[in-house]
Structures are given as C-alpha cells and as structure tokens.
Amino acid sequence: MSRIKTVFSQLKSQNKAALIPFITAGDPDADTTVALMHQLTQSGVDLIELGVPFSDPMADGPTIQRASERALKHHISLQDVFTMVAQFRKTNQATPVVLMGYANPVEAMGYKKFVEGASEAGVDGVLIVDYPPEESAEWVQSLEEKAIDPIFLLSPTTSEARIKHVAELAKGYVYYVSLKGVTGASHLDLQDVSDKLSQLRAHINIPIGVGFGIRDEQTARDVAERADAVVIGSYIVEEIERSSAEDLLANVGARVASLRRAIDTKSNHASGKGE
C-alpha cells in the first residue's frame, strides 16, 4: 500500500480528516525547508505538499507568489527540490510528500527524468496545475510506472465530463479548489463546498481534499467536517514570511498544531468519505 493510501486509510479508521500543509521548496531557503518539513510532521500534519518554485504561478495569490520569489532568489531548481525530499526521507519514511507545481519546469527537465528523479528522492504524488487531464494519459502512465500518484485539481466550474475523466486517472486523492480565484482568497461558501463534494463523490471513490480560502482554524474545522483532507497554504506561508529566522520553526509549528486541534474537533455528521 502506498504511503498516501496508508495515511488516508488510518485516518478513516479514526474518523479524522487529513491535515495537508503547503509550503514552497526553498522558502526562505533550502536548509530551512527540510527543517520545516520535519517541524510540520512533529506538529501533526499527515501529508506535505511541497511547491516547486516557478516564476509565473498563475493559480497562486500574492502570498504564494512571494514565496516562489524568495525561493527563486536562491536559484532553487527541480533538482534542488528532489534533494530536499531525499534529505527529508533520510529520517522520515512515513509522511507522504506531494510535489505541486507547473508544467514548465517539468517540460524543461523532461517527463522521464522528472519521474525518475522524483521516485529516487521519495516523492509519493505529483500535482501539476496546468496539465489538463484530457492530455495527461502519457504523464499518468509515466508516474504510475514509478508508483507515484497522479493528483488532479477540480474546481467549482469543472464539468461533469471532466470530473468523470479525473475519476478514471487520479490516484491518492483529488484536490478540490473550493472557490473561484487564486490561493489566499477568502469568502469560502461552505454550502457550495458541501454541494460540490456530493457531486464529486458520485464519481470519485478516492479521498477528496479541499483547499483555497481556508484562512483560520474555524474554517479548517468546518471543511474537515465535509472533506477527507484540509489543504492549507497561504495561512502557513504567511507565518514563514513574517517570522524571524530564530522563531520561524516554533511559530509555524504552533500554527499547525492549532490547526490540527481544530480539525480533530470536527463533529461526526460528515458522510460519504472516500476510501
């Protein structure tokens, strides 16, 4: 069983939602990223989404854009990202790591080299924002040859036909973008999220994580009542941005621990969860 499947299976048996933080590799620098990954696990996360810094992150709001800019000042490359994951794997063999980014760096490196590098480093899943599922058959096959889960985004405007297509391709979990806009936006409508998740679960039988627009503990708890996973990026990256080097790990750890406590207090009315 893959690390991602194992984690979701364990959480389901405990009636818990997964806490998935997003941080950008190389923000504020490569060494701190590895330390941050360990801090995140010590603070209670279940899976880590590690962003590949990119100069034109069109799905990301200003907070994540600035994180990419800080990383790129250190010339963080895809190979550097693999090195960070490999360093993390030296002492952590349990926590799944999903790389999240854009097509350009992968295309520049080449499918095969990317997949081989990700596999050797210990990556468990990959989400490329701008790979349309309708054109991803070869990509998915390449990942599956190395037992890496292909993860896809769905949004409030995703058509029924595309939902069915993603249901056939995706493994690990599906990432539902909970609102129209970029990361860091607000105005999350929980009723809309519930309605859309019901529609998605009619076709998708793997866990569904919800991200975008989750900016505090109460919202995280509300989403945990509805989804299999809560994905939080900007709320954590903001702490990285404003913390001093001396306080960064402790501050991020405290914020993540608070989120963990919040989602673990969810009520039990959620239903229809994935495997």
Image (tube, rainbow, N blue to C red):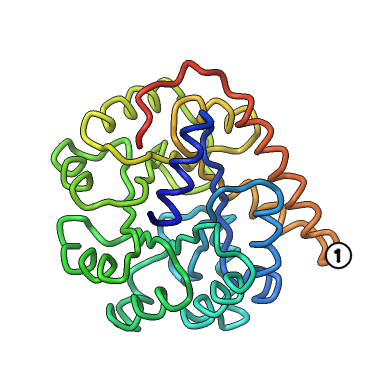
Q: Which one is in front, 257 or 9?
A: 9
Quarter residue 38 falls in: bottom right
**Residue 184 percent across, percent down from the top left:** 54, 46
**Residue 187 percent across, percent down from the top left:** 51, 30
Residue 137 in the image: above or below residue 13: below
Residue 65 in the image: above or below residue 183: below
**In the picture, which quadrant includes the N terminus?**
bottom left
**Residue 209 percent across, percent down from the top left:** 43, 41
Q: Which one is in front, 172 or 58?
A: 172
**In the picture, which quadrant includes the C terminus?**
top left
**Residue 121 percent across, percent down from the top left:** 48, 76
Label 1: which secondary element: loop
Question: Which residue is most to the right?
Answer: 246
In percent of the image, x 30 and y 25: which residue is there? 198
Q: Which one is in front, 138 or 55?
A: 138
Q: What amino acid type is highlighted by mark number 1?
A: Glu
In percent of the image, x 44 and y 39: which residue is there? 210
Q: Is residue 50 left or right of residue 87?
A: left
| Residue underneath mark 1 | 246
